[in-house]
Image (cartoon, rainbow, N blue to C red):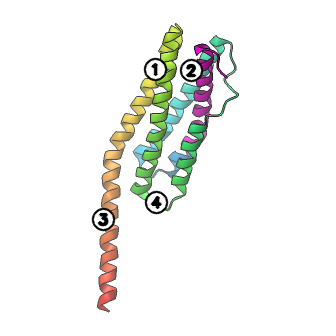
Amino acid sequence: MPEGLKELYIDELKDLYNAENQLIKALPKMAKAASSDGLRQGFEEHLEQTKGHAQRLEKIFKALGENPKGKTCKAMEGLVEEGAETMQEDFEGSLMDAALIGAAQRVEHYEIAAYGTVCAFAKELGETEHVSSLTKTLEEEKETNDKLTELAQEINTRANASGEKEQQSDRSKKKSSQAA
């Protein structure tokens, strides 16, 4: 159990390191499930960025003389599991993309909260080099969330339009079967 802010800081960093590594495994699957080229490309770009986030954390651990391993981020585990369940649904096209964006934004919001916390701890501990590195990651997570929001505007509209077409088609089928 953490005894002071520095120990809590290290514990939170270990949690984030594990979270980033879970994402490194999950993002390729999300990219594969996406039908939108823009969304697929966004997931692929964020994968490379996420690898960089893990490397930044490794540098911080090295500077602290600490091992980054040894903690499982249960929150990310749950978010990744939810994302995997989403990909197993029978959603297609824009509807699947809309579901993937929802899953990805939940991940981003978790990361934004977690990086905000460790930035505040690093400031309080006087770890100015860490603050700079962690703030850069925090800003990248916010940018990713903003990009997902932009993609969602177009994708949600397409998902809604395709859903309306399916409903109209279902109504047409019912009318023709009732007339027969």
Element under disc 4? loop
Which of the labelled discs sits on residue 91, or is there none? 4
> Between marks 4 and 3, how big is the CA–CA gap?
15 Å
Residue stretch rendered in magenta on the structure: 1-28
Contact flag, marks 1 and 2 (Cβ < 8 Å)? yes
Give the quarter of the figure containing the N terminus: top right
Which residue is pictured at 51% across the width and 53% down the height?
86
Chief secondary structure of the magenta portion: helix
User: Circle 4: is it few (<14), some (14-19), or many (20+) Cα within 10 Å?
Assistant: few
Number of numbered markers: 4
Which of the labelled discs sits on residue 94, or is there none? none
User: Circle 3: is it few (<14), some (14-19), or many (20+) Cα within 10 Å?
Assistant: few
Name the residue carrying label 2.
56
**Residue type at mark 4?**
Phe
**Closer to the N terminus: mark 2 or mark 4?**
2
Name the residue carrying label 3.
164
- Residue 8 sits inside the magenta stretch: yes
Name the residue carrying label 1.
136
- Residue 20 position, x and y percent, is 57, 32
Camera-side residue of 67 and 161: 67
